Image: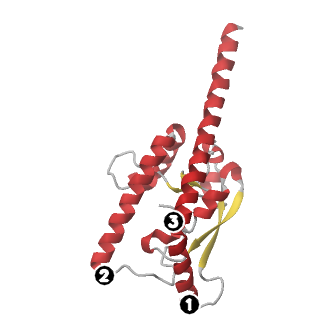
Amino acid sequence: MRAVREALGRAGGSLADRAAALTRKRALDLALGSALLLLAAPALALATLVLAVRAPHGRGSVLLREARVGMGGRPFELRSLRTRRFRLDLLSRLPHVVRGDLSLVGPPPLRPDDPALSAPRTDPWRRELRPGLTGLAQVRARSGMPWDEPALLDAHYAEHHGTGLDLAILARSARIHLRTELREARRGKARLSDTDHRPPGYSGVD
């Protein structure tokens, strides 16, 4: 009986720790997500206006709308601007972070028909974590490590996520995107596009 009580105590403590971690993660999403949205609002408004003027198909072509699956298997419509410059497509998803559809950091949001969701042994963490704007797989994909498969990195993040890791991933992601924009600007290729050049099936959360 003592062993049973100890096992139950450890399980209860693990659940409590997990709930506390998710609460801290949600608090970070609300605070930092709201601040980033406020800072990005002028750029997003300008980009929306420019895309609306240039849009060849009239209303509705400014936003890309995609079906995605969120925390607990709940489906939602992911909306993002049809532009990649300065990663405004990602910044335009910040309202999803504030609402709770997405987290700032997490595994990529999957389509409802993604095989990873219908596999017989679907990883339980896919239902316990909100998908993110960026994640460990996105910032480590080109590190050259032999175990850098996205699924393994997402599983590693799900097991070890915390505020410190989230902030480190956000900082790393910002540096990567800044270097990309500066490199494109030097090549003279950076411009606000009114079309979507992403290949079919691209999630855009990187």
Question: Where does residue 48 sit, x and y in percent of width and height?
Answer: 56, 80
Residue 206 position within the rendered picture, expressed as x and y whole percent measured from the top left: 47, 61
| Secondary element type, mark 1 | helix
Tell me the kind of residue under disc 3: Leu
Judge whether 200 appears above or below 130 on screen.
Answer: below
Q: Label 1: how many residues lie within 10 Å, few (<14), some (14-19) or many (20+)? A: few
Badges 1 and 3: C-beta atoms under 8 Å apart? Answer: no
- Which label's residue is closer to the chain start, 1 or 3? 3
Residue lying at the far left of the rendered structure: 186
Q: Amino acid at mark 2?
A: Gly
Label 2 vs 1, first from the N-terminus: 1
Q: 71 and 142: which one is in front?
A: 71
Q: Is residue 84 left or right of residue 131?
A: left
Which of discs 2 and 1 lies nearer the camera? The answer is 1
The quarter of the picture where residue 12 lies is top right
Residue at horizontal 59%, vertical 81%? 62
Q: Nearer the viewer, residue 26 or 136?
A: 26
* Residue kind at label 1, given as amino acid type: Val
In the picture of the structure, the residue carrying the numbered disc 1 is 53
